[in-house]
Image (cartoon, grey):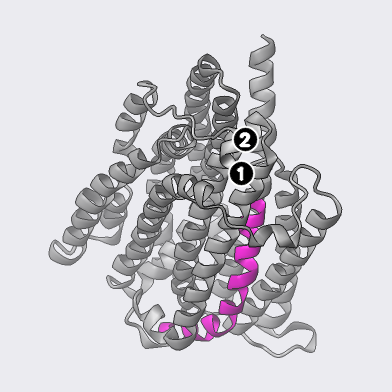
Amino acid sequence: MTQERSFYKEFFILYVALVLQNVVTLSVNLTDNIMLGAYSETSLAGVAAANQIQFVYQMLLNGFGEGMVILGSQYWGKRQIEPMKRIAAMTMQHGLVIMAILFIVISLFPEWAIGLFTTDQPIIAEGADYLSIIRFTYIFFAITQLLLAILRSTQVVKIALYLSAMAFFVNCGINYVLIFGNFGAPEMGTAGAAIGTLAARILETTVLILYIIKTEKNLRMKLRDFFHFDRTLWKDYMHVTLPILITNGLWGANTALQTAILGHMTAAAIAANSAASNLFLLVKSTASGAASAAGVVIGKAIGIGDMERVKDYARRLQKLFLVIGICSGILLFFLRIPVLSLYDLKPETKEMANTFLIILSIVDVGMSYQMPTNTGIIRGGGDTMYVVKLDLVSIWLIVLPLSFFMAFVVKAPPAVVVCCLNADQIFKCVPAFIRCNSWKWIHRLTREETQAIQ
């Protein structure tokens, strides 16, 4: 009973904070979309296309961060701090390299980047205008996301929620003033939304760095610590992280291709998909939070060395994921009407978004089981290659070819294409269940203290 109470307490403290952080963070995007949807459907579509680039970037940063959490949480279970600091340094170094590459590409080829997702010239122009400002957020976003991942590996998660809430209010306030030109400010539309996001990102990073300097007690990292490089630990880190980067990169490309497929079907489809997907991502936070919390809990238990506890936790988590999925699917179904009523969209666009959300409310149930099981339990337990193989088969050999065929050969309606694009969220439940309950995913990844810091 003591172990059971300890498990639920540990999981739900992490889970609630991570879900609330994700909800608040995504509420910023949802509010941006609602404001831009009220301002101009073209602006909404342009920013939606630009945000696909941000999504791929975020997925890559998350890959480096998740590698830190998986390996770092096992060291945290053993209370070995020095290896965690070395791994944290390499996490930041890799993330900043990705940031620099993306910044250069977007600075040189903004129209080309937006043109990957739509052929509509007014939408491309709006998206490029947004990118000209939003590219400066990339460095602040990288630093913040990776520092939060480092803290999450030591089970420090509340600061992320506070930062997200602060960013939400700052971004919304500036958006209200600059998008519409309120209080005598210039009416800037898409550029105003970008300025709001940039201001919020700068403030987030500043406050987080001050928190780490003044308050953080677990790792006590200093600036000089981020210049360390340990070849032995780097091999361990990349062994864990590389498969995650491949998976996240594939997932980011898959999401971007979904937008591209719908964007090349009808002019209304990209706006409808943007309105639907932002609400879906908001509700999906329940599954994302479960995956992140499960990864930390499982990793720490493996680090302690109690394998029976690991198996017990995995069984309990799978039952929780099913309950979370059913509840979030029902929530999405009933939220769709009031949220879509906030958008000022054409009737056919709004009806298409409503259809998309009905489909996604069913998809959410399956996704809420398979995603936390695959990326939380199995990947958090050290089996990072399994998810790569599963996604390669399900997404790139089944989902995307089928979706392209239905969209451009059969000329099926957008709703049918959305079903095809999300089919993997249902059928991946079966291999997730089989793999999880085989226990083959449990791997100890840590070294002894003397090995790790040599």
State the image coordinates of residue 351 (x, y, percent, origin top left).
41, 60
Residue at mark 1: 453
Residue at 64% in and 30% down = 77
The image quadrant that residue 125 belongs to is bottom left
Label 2: few (<14), some or many (≥20) within 10 Å? some
Badge 1 vs badge 2, beta-carbon distance below 8 Å: yes
Q: Which residues are magenta?
A: 123-148
Q: Which mark is residue 449?
A: 2
Residue 128 falls inside the magenta stretch: yes
Amino acid type at circle 1 is: Ile
Q: Indicate the secondary structure of the residue bearing disc 1.
A: loop
Label 1: few (<14), some or many (≥20) within 10 Å? some
State the image coordinates of residue 435 (x, y, percent, origin top left).
34, 27
Q: Is residue 394 visible?
A: yes
Residue at 44% in and 80% down = 105
Q: Which of the pair 264/99 is nearer the observer?
A: 99
Q: Which of the pair 38/85 is nearer the observer?
A: 85
Amino acid type at circle 2 is: Glu
Q: Quadrant of the C terminus?
A: top right
Q: Is residue 379 left or right of residue 224?
A: left
Q: Which mark is residue 275?
A: none
Q: Quadrant of the N terminus?
A: top right
Residue at 80% in and 84% down = 183
State the image coordinates of residue 139 (x, y, percent, origin top left).
61, 71
Residue pushed farthest right?
A: 214
